Image (spheres, rainbow, N blue to C red):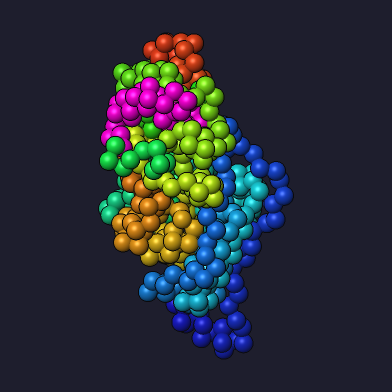
Amino acid sequence: MFALLALLLTACGGTPAASPTTAPAVTTAPAADATTPPTDATAPATDATTPPTDATAPATDATTAPAGEVKITIWHQWDGKYVDAIQAAFDAYEASHPGVTIDLSKPDDVNNALLVAVPAGEGPDIIGWANDQIGQSALAGNIVPLDDYGITQEFLSSTYEPAAVNGVVWQEKIWGLPESQEGIALIYNKALVAEADLPTSLDDLLAKATAFKDANPDKTYVCNQGFGTADAYHVAPVYFGFGVPAYVDAEGMAYVNTPEMIKGGEWLAAMSKVSLSEQSYDICKAALAEGKVAMWWTGPWAIAGIEEDGVDYGILSMGKPFVGIKTLLLTKNAVDRGNAEVALDIMKYFTSAEVQKTIALANKTIPAATAAVQDAEIQALPTLAGFGQAMNAGVPMANTPFASAQWTPVGDASIAIFSGAQAPADALAAAQAAIEDAISQMK
């Protein structure tokens, strides 16, 4: 049919026109995402490293886009110098797929921009976004499930890491392809902790923290900005490490007032007795650099600063961290324009092990593709190998709209436990009630 149409157009002297997919300009101020931890609980949005200027573009796959001119618009959240390696990857795709143009745009407020653009048919074909936006985006009709376009659970499970796989599945459908992961692990100062004496479990971590404090009254074993603050994100490795499956699941069931959660609370209460009285990102960073703390429980975003401070460090996976997953989502606009096939091919290419390995080596991000995580070059880099191991054991950031109910109650309960204002069981019972009340109002 395409060949016949081309002949007819040639005979008439016409040429095929490109699809109108230009994203509208957006100037609205960014708003907080409903499912994202409060501002003081999130990891600092700083670049972990500067990508090398000679980073080569990744090789492209063998797939070929359909004939004709196609413009694919991607709205994304990539920032800073990270974009250099990402742009190089898309440039390489364009070079091997004549007729395909990829436009990258970064709206200030994706949620508000989508409200206007998608109904008008002027939204993106692909959204590069965090997985915690999947539920509300699907309910709004902005994105479409990939099951309808040949993406299977078998493909997902055989290609990507466990937390990344679970993080893009909602209501038994696949809503995106994961590109990278982010979470926290213990970064330890080798001058204070011998590798042979590293803790092997949460209970061992507490025992070693107690012994370290006894031997070094002016120092502390571990610093975590979630200790003593309303930060459900940074204390998550403790709760999840004791067996809590999630704070809130996709059906709106909370797991906060459970034996496993209470055990985690009791661990926090005990750790408070051998911890700094005040902890924050800046306090932990300075204390690690000055040799006043042996370990800092944080993420890859802190590595650049640690290296600038000259700390000889190692990375240790501990507990089960919350894993944020950066994903590519296919939009309804792409389907309406007839761009779904090309857009999905770009999504599979960009999230492939080969491309994500190249980007990871440049940007020091943690790939979601299992083959990239296990690649010898990635494993040779302690930062990527250490955080990759931590993410493999982690719990994906919730992608359900009910997730917005978890942050404040869990954060408040953790403060009460760490400060000694409430017993763990009492604080967590109150948090459970608050979450259930909030969810009942959403249903």
Residue plotted at (31% across, 22% down): 260
Residue plotted at (48% across, 37% down): 291
From the viewer's side, name the closer residue of 115 and 354.
354
Relative to 354, residue 129 above or below: above
Is residue 88 within the magenta segment?
A: no
- Answer with the quarter of the image where residue 210 lies: top left
- In percent of width and height, residue 42 lies at 54, 36
- In percent of width and height, residue 87 lies at 55, 65
Residue plotted at (44% across, 61% down): 361
Relative to 234, residue 314 above or below: below
Report the magenta residues as a range: 198-227
- Answer with the quarter of the image where residue 23 lies: bottom right
- Which image quarter holds the N terminus? bottom left
- In percent of width and height, residue 46 lies at 57, 47
Residue plotted at (46% across, 33% down): 293
From the viewer's side, name the closer residue of 154 and 285.
285
Q: 438 left or right of 161?
A: right
Question: Would residue 272 be seen by someone viewing this image from the given angle?
Answer: yes
From the viewer's side, name the closer residue of 226 and 87.
226
Is residue 201 within the magenta segment?
A: yes
Q: 257 left or right of 287?
A: left
Q: 157 left or right of 143?
A: left
- In percent of width and height, residue 227 lies at 48, 26
